Image (tube, rainbow, N blue to C red):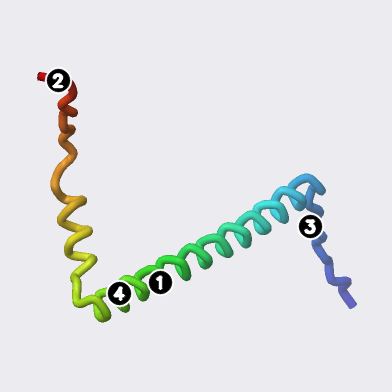
């Protein structure tokens, strides 16, 4: 009867620790992304409710302000 040979993989402890740290970091980042997504959805819902209640198109007004360009304006100071 032939003996079965088993291969044993030995991973350096430092690699295992690095992998665990990276996995923990991924979990933290996924949690943060989830929280940010909830915040975005909450704010969008608040804008939607405000638009309905006050009959104002907030998104359209906000978009038009942002799309006006990136030019700078000069501040007029001085006396006559």
**Residue at which label 4 appears:** 50
Q: Which residue is mark 2?
A: 79
Nearest to N terminus: mark 3 or mark 4: 3
Asked if residue 23 lies left or right of residue 1, the reply is left
Provide residue 27's location: percent of width, then percent of height.
Answer: 62, 62
- Please name which of the two marks, 3 or 4, marks the residue nearer to the observer: 4
SS at circle 1: helix
Bin the neighbour count of mark 1 within 10 Å (Cα to Cα): few under 14, some 14-19, many 20 and up: few
Asked whether 62 or 39 is in front, the reply is 62
Circle 3 sits on which residue? Answer: 9
Cα–Cα gap, marks 1 and 2: 49 Å
- Residue found at x 36% / y 75%: 45
Query: Label 4 near label 3: C-beta < 8 Å?
Result: no
Return the x and y of residue 8 as percentages of the image width and height.
82, 60
Residue 21 as seen in the image, left or right of residue 56 = right
16 or 8: nearer the viewer: 16
Does 49 sit above or below residue 64? below
Q: Residues within 10 Å of mark 3 (few under 14, many from 20)?
A: few
Answer whether labels 1 and 2 touch (C-beta < 8 Å): no
Q: Residues within 10 Å of mark 4 (few under 14, many from 20)?
A: some
- Left or right, 51 with respect to 17, comes to left
- Give the position of the C terminus as an image quadrant: top left
Which quadrant holds residue 78? Answer: top left
Residue 33 pos. (x, y %): 51, 62
Q: Earlier in the sequence, mark 3 or mark 1?
A: 3
Q: Nearer the viewer, mark 4 or mark 1?
A: 4
Q: Which residue is mark 1?
A: 41
Q: Earlier in the sequence, mark 4 or mark 1?
A: 1
The residue under the point 69% across, 53% down is 19
Residue at image coords 52%, 67%? 34
Q: Is residue 69 above or below residue 64?
A: above
């Amino acid at each position: 009867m032939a003996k079965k040979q088993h291969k044993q993989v030995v991973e350096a402890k430092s690699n295992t620790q690095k992998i665990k740290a990276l996995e923990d970091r991924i979990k933290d980042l996924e949690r943060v992304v989830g929280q940010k997504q909830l915040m975005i959805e909450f704010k969008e819902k608040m804008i939607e409710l405000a638009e309905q209640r006050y009959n104002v198109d907030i998104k359209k007004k906000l978009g038009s302000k942002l799309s006006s360009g990136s030019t700078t304006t000069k501040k007029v100071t001085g006396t006559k």
